[in-house]
Amino acid sequence: MTRKKNQRIKVAGLILSCAIIAACDRNFENPVGDEDYNSGTADFSKFVTIGDSLTAGYADGALYLDGQKNSYPAILAQQFAKVGGGAFNQPLVSDNLGGLLFGGVANPDFGNRLVLNAEPKNPPSNLDPKGPEPIAGTPTTEVIGSGLNGSVFNNMGVPGAKSFHLAAANYGDATGLGAGTANPYFVRFSSAAGTTMIADAAAQQPSFFILWIGNNDILSYATTGGIGTDQKSNTNPSTYGSNDITDPAAFAGVYNGLVTILTPANASAKGVLLNIPDVSTLPYFTTVPYNAVPLDQLNAEALNNNLYADYNEGVQTALGGTEEGDAEVIKRKITFTAGQNAVVIEDDTLTDLSGVGLASMRQATATDLLILTTSSKIGTLANPGNANSAWGLGVPLEDGDVLIPSEIQAIETARTAFNTTIAAAADADPDLILVDVAAIMNEVKTSGINYGTGFIDGTYATGGTFSLDGVHPTARGYSVVANRIIDKINSSFGANIPPVDPGSYSTIFVK
Amino acid sequence: MKIRILVIASMCISTGAFAGGYRVALQGQNATGMGHTGVAVKDSAEVVFFNPASMSSLKTDSNFSTGVTLINSVTKYQNASTNTAAETENPIGTPLYLYYSKKFNQQISYGLGVYTPYGNSVKWPKDWAGSYLVNDISLRTVFVQPTVSFKVNDKFSLGFGPTYVNGSVELNRNLTSSLVDENGDRANVTVKASGVTAWGYNAGFLINPIQTLSLGINYRSKVDMQARGENAKFNNVPSSLKSTYADTTFDADLVLPAELTLGIAFDVSSNTLLAIDVNRTFWSAYKNLDIKFNNGTDPSLNPRNYNDANIYRVGVQHKLNNALTVRGGAYYDDSPISAGYYTPETPRNNSLGLTAGASYQVTKRVDISVSFLYLMFNEFNGAYDYVEQDTDPSTPNKSFGGDYLTSVTAVGFGFNYKY
């Protein structure tokens, strides 16, 4: 009996101690971070990325330290390091402000990064936030004589670069800054004055590369509201202005040349090609509504009677009578009503009636895209002495403030052609894969992305995907792109590379 | 004397997170040893909680029981699609109880219970992946229950006690999944309510159709904890948002749901008792954990929509000799949480509890008891799909999900005095 009791106690004690230890040791059947990561058929020992601001890690209107550290290439390199990836050197700027110095002198065109001032504009009547503003501070990043020249960098992302700039000699030559043939971001870290971006990339003989170029071939035109020229059929980029759309044939020639240079540089090299998102998926073009102006009955009538009665009548007189003319009369008729009103915009595709003293203007429609900067312009006075000169009401918004349908069409035609070229290049070589960034950004815009531990969408400032410049992603947005690239590498090259948690990356910064 | 005990009791109260949302079923070491059965068991002052009707069936005139349990619980979280993992570092919880029952005459008994049936203490790493749902939460409640029991006849008795509940809760979470101040520190809010009081009751019936069999019914009412004008403090808020997120007061309601328990206790032999309880918790009363700020800041809307859930309990007690009694038991606890409502503040799933216990008769009047509990939650993949409830139905739900795995061990010590 006693023995039996002792045995029972022993058994009970054993069960209990097992239970207590087991409770501490229990783990998931398939714990994360415990997987057999591998690079598949890819070799990440020398990983090089070539591209523009999106590759550099540009965000919030500037290239700043944290942005670079969270660039999609840096995020990828950090994950590639788990599967044999080598060192990844970036041409890091000197501070977290992002502004540039040219020989010690700050340049207003290259200011500090934006932070959101969320204070109400004019409390209590107007609770809208004041909006983005450059962070205070004196920048320290020097363009000329940065100390970076002479060596090469894994991240060859240069903000502002277009496709043809990658093969342009002296693009990193400080002496070309004044003439606009050089780019200050490349001047900072070009290996030599006469080199090209692609030469510096190819010199590293990348075992794995990512090429994401062509965004600025349409974006510089789009962000300036289409004041540039659509260079369709002009295959000579040296004749282009800085805000022009690159000819698709010129793009194809340059692009295929770049791919050719990168692939034979290392016979076993593999690469990822990224395509160009639709500008209408970027909050820079979708945040300011076409009918942003609230008016009461009194003000609406005053505008109609005092400012546009003559215009409407003049247009009727000049154009009415034909079917085509009547259609334009309707399109150009400017009427304000109580409630939300469409702003008045310039439209140079309208019949030129300047001869009879009538401006080429009309009210905007949902098919026009007002650019982000108009949010602080609409309603302010074009002529401070004239109360009737409010932008968008008394005075039409300018060509550079809005993308009209013909401009959007030009952008889309070029973009579609660029993406066809990019997809064909990826198709032609089994070592190259395409990541459809255009589709990712469309997903962000239409449904948002639930990444498992959180959610981002394309809403300006609060959506999480886009930084305060409305064009470039946040660190979180870049990390989602990086995860999609990892997915594609895993499925195409038989690799097993872990993703990152987008939730651990920052979004916008609030003052 | 009683007041002093109450003060000491309320100072020690802190409980671990597990089982049935924020219900912590550890209200007696004898019962815990037997799978936390007890609605038809009548051998100690623990009946004040488990079934007040049994007070008048206790063998001795005066019965006193007190005890404390040390809970160690760990929840692990991971999300394979983002390669994220986190683990709670919960403080050791210490639910306790104190029961007293005295016979007034052969028919009437009276007594008092002080116990802590609801609590929650979960501490995730600061700013972890789910920090915009919860960084840490601590819920404490003390129930004080004066009780009377009336023995109608040898076969039937009933009991009733109003419960006075004093509770406090503190919750910290990040304001959003991204908001940081200039220094990159995550903006967060702490809501803290203390000294919230409410009333409920505990009622039971005991039927003894034959000498060796008892049937018990116990109902513990819902308790509505209503926090009014308590403090909300916003931390690391960017300076330009200071007016939007100014420290303020808040109102919130937390329901402690009703429980109905049916059970039998059967003397298998003169030394062996078998008990089976079925427990239904009316969790459907827990609709949301909404926090309404009193300064115009948008309310925090957090739907929960729990379902009523059952717990099936079985326990055995065997008297080895006059000094030593051993106990064993198990229970299966159905999750009250529907798909899409799994939050990291009460991350739980169906669970299986294994228990053991023993009592040692030190003197004729005094015995001490110990109990052990090992509670295994199934590993599961769940998500909370209502992260930011939006009134616009076209807005997609924001979701936080992943794999959860919770384990709990508890060791309890009790002291019983009867004369």
Image: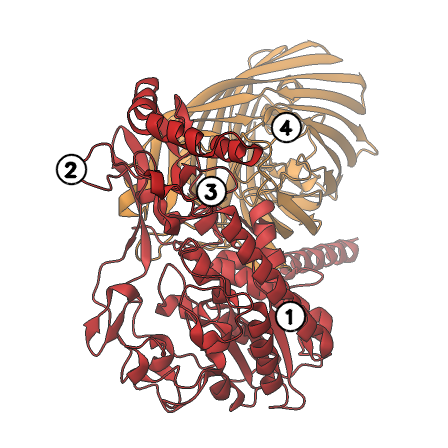
Chain colours: A red, B orange
10 Å neighbourhood of mark 2: few (<14), some, or many (≥20)? few
Q: Chain of mark 3?
A: B
Three-letter residue code for mark 2: Gly
Three-letter residue code for mark 1: Thr
Which residue is identified by label 4? Answer: B283
Q: CA distance from mark 1 to mark 2?
A: 52 Å
Which label number is shown at residue A421? 1
10 Å neighbourhood of mark 4: few (<14), some, or many (≥20)? many
Give the residue at x 53% y 53%. Answer: B88
Which label number is shown at residue A385? 2
Tell me if label 3 and label 1 are in contact, CB under 8 Å.
no
Q: Chain of mark 2?
A: A
Q: What percent of the width, then of the height, locates residue A255?
A: 58, 76
Three-letter residue code for mark 3: Ile
- Where disc 4 sits, the SS reads helix
Tell me the quarter of the picture where residue B106 sits.
top right
Three-letter residue code for mark 4: Trp
Which label number is shown at residue B137? 3
Q: CA distance from mark 3 to mark 1?
A: 55 Å
**Placement of A338 over or under B350, stated as above or below:** above
Give the residue at x 58% y 24%. Answer: B48
- Where disc 3 sits, the SS reads strand
Mark closer to the observer (3, 2): 2
Q: Tell whether B219 sits left or right of B238.
A: right
Q: Which is more N-terminal, label 4 or label 3?
A: 3
Q: CA distance from mark 3 to mark 4?
A: 19 Å
Q: CA distance from mark 1 to mark 4?
A: 59 Å
Q: Chain of mark 4?
A: B
Q: What percent of the width, then of the height, locates residue B42?
A: 68, 26
Q: What percent of the width, then of the height, locates residue A495?
A: 69, 75
Which label number is shown at residue A158? none
Q: CA distance from mark 3 to mark 2?
A: 59 Å
